[in-house]
Amino acid sequence: MKKTIGTLIVVTMMAMGVSSKVAASENSAEQEGWRLVWSDEFDGNTLDQSKWRYDIGNGYPNLPGWGNEELQYYSDHPKNVRVENGELIIEAHQETVSDQYGTYGYTSGKVLTDGRFSQTYGRFEARMRLPAGQGFWPAFWMMPQHDRYGGWAASGEIDIMENAGATPHKVGGAIHYGGPWPDNRFSAGDYYFPNGTNATDYHEYAVEWEPGEIRWYVDGNLYLTLNDWYTVGGPYPAPFDQEFYLILNLAVGGWYGGNPDGSTPFPSTMAVDYVRVYQR
């Protein structure tokens, strides 16, 4: 009987224009006590700019290299960021571009919900596949909508997933906290994929963030739990008690995985099937 009712619900939702994959995901999440409050299924033909905005450039004048020695110039050109076949595509190219601050050898894309959507606590998840190659640094992460406790990293950072392209057999999760740079701290952990799969395949990456605890998952497998952090700007559980927004990007170069070399394949893409946010 439950199976029949569940099937009828999915069929009804499909008739209403809600995809079966969303219905199945909501049903699973609701069983765990979560309620879907925001999502992007990338079903259109262009990036929904009511949900996302672009970052442009290389971080100048305040954060050259985006503060991480990154080499790429972020662009809003469709070759770098586009929506097609139900996916968000972020694509890195080896090409020379210039702006008033300098010349760069690579272009890529970065989108964020800054100013469009932010939330305190919840389940934040995305299904995606990543590129393999020396020097790629794809990431799904979160930053505070308002720096309530001071400059980075006193107000926190939550890295839901990041990967060094030369090591597709693993991904990482982390938080950054403490004092403003250079007095910042971080805690992190890695997930190693089972034999036969890696980051170039589709996987679901998620965090469940609740007061005083953040948990990291890959395909529903819990691999990291953190509940010990601080900020010079306020009492625990600060800084992770304020609204954060979402970021998706594909960096080229930087300290996390090093710079590209002659073996790095260009162009290469990061493909995102969906992004979903839940509340208890």
Image (cartoon, rainbow, N blue to C red):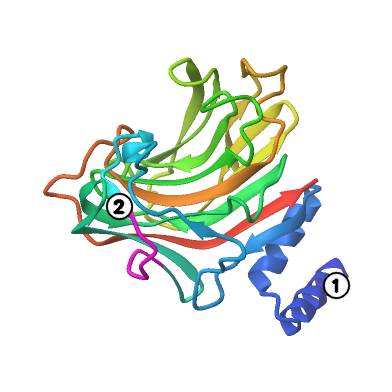
Image-based side of 43 in relation to 132, left or right: right
Against 54, is 48 above or below? below
Give the mark count: 2
x, y percentage for residue 36? 74, 57
x, y percentage for residue 30? 79, 54
137 or 78, nearer to the observer: 78
Mark 1 falls on what kind of element? helix
The residue that label 1 is drawn on is 5
* Residue 96 placement: quadrant: bottom left
Against 35, is 77 above or below? below
Tag 1: amino acid: Ile
Residue 73: image tag? 2
Residue at 77% x, 48% y is: 279
Residue at 57% x, 23% y is: 154
Please report contact status of discs 1 and 2: CB closer than 8 Å, yes or no: no
Quarter of the rendering occupied by the C terminus: top right
139 or 9, nearer to the observer: 139
Image-based side of 6 in relation to 90, left or right: right
Quarter of the rendering occupied by the N terminus: bottom right
